[in-house]
DNA sequence: TCAATATTTAGATAAATTTCTAAGTTTCTA
DNA sequence: TAGAAACTTAGAAATTTATCTAAATATTGA
């Protein structure tokens, strides 16, 4: 879960997750939304993947990135725990 | 909110928040739970404070740190939004 | 007012992070 | 089977972060 918190600490990566919330996208399509270089976006995508926040799948020349919500839910669980509320029983 | 995500990205700072979930503590009491030096803990506490995750109040020689949950709720809101669920209406 | 206690601030260093350009890999198609 | 397109990997530079020791500040109590 540390990797997830680390991944979430960068604004570009959070914005990528917000893009993927609406629909899965190729690396190129994602990079069109930013000013930074494609290798940099690729690096961010790799960190998100390592953190388990996205999944990737090659489709021909493209690599499609998809939001993976399991870890997001884990993080939410941690946050709720800090509030001393449980997200399970209520 | 970027400061909050940044603050949450460090394991020591997350552990501090977990300590404060149970009860407010002085800087010294907090530092007893860690191996790192007091100035380092002080630095982490300052980042948590800048992020709005804790409040501090001097009580005599001690400075008491308290969990401040408003920003935690904001972060939870952001996370829920990623899941396309709303924490308001359900 | 002085010394002790609690904590922060300053300044330095090492490690991690973000970003870039250049080069490599994979896949499609003419 | 070459060339183009889509990405990633490698390697380097600049910035940020985490940590330490030493010094400064604030409060209490004798």
Image: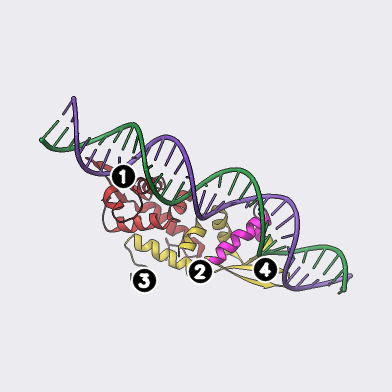
Chain colours: A yellow, B red, C purple, D green
Q: Residue at x 52, y 68 (%)?
A: A52
Question: For the point 54% across and 69% down, which residue is it?
Answer: A68
Which numbered tag is attached to residue B56?
1
Q: Give the range drawn in magenta.
A: A30-50
Q: Where is residue B37 in the image (x, y as percent from the top left)?
A: 35, 49
Q: Residue A69 carries which label?
A: 2
- The answer to the question of whether label 2 and label 4 lie on touching residues, with beta carbons closer than 8 A, is no
Q: Which chain carries label 4?
A: A
- Mark 1 and mark 4: Cα distance apart in space: 48 Å
Q: Which one is closest to the eye, mark 2 or mark 4?
A: 4
Q: Tag 3, which secondary structure? A: loop
Q: Residue at x 27, y 48 (%)?
A: B28
Q: How many marks?
A: 4
Work out whether mark 2 precedes mark 4 in sequence or the reverse, and give the earlier one.
4
Alpha carbons under labels 2 and 1: distance apart: 35 Å
The residue under label 3 is A88
Query: Where does label 4 land, which residue?
Result: A63
């Amino acid at each position: 879960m540390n990797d997830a918190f680390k991944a979430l600490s960068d604004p570009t990566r959070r914005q990528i997750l917000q893009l993927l919330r609406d629909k899965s996208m190729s690396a190129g399509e994602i990079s069109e939304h930013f000013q930074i270089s494609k290798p940099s976006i690729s690096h961010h995508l790799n960190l998100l993947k390592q953190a388990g926040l996205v999944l990737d799948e090659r489709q021909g020349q493209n690599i499609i990135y998809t939001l993976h919500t399991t870890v997001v839910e884990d993080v939410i669980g941690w946050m709720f725990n800090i509030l001393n509320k449980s997200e399970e029983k209520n």
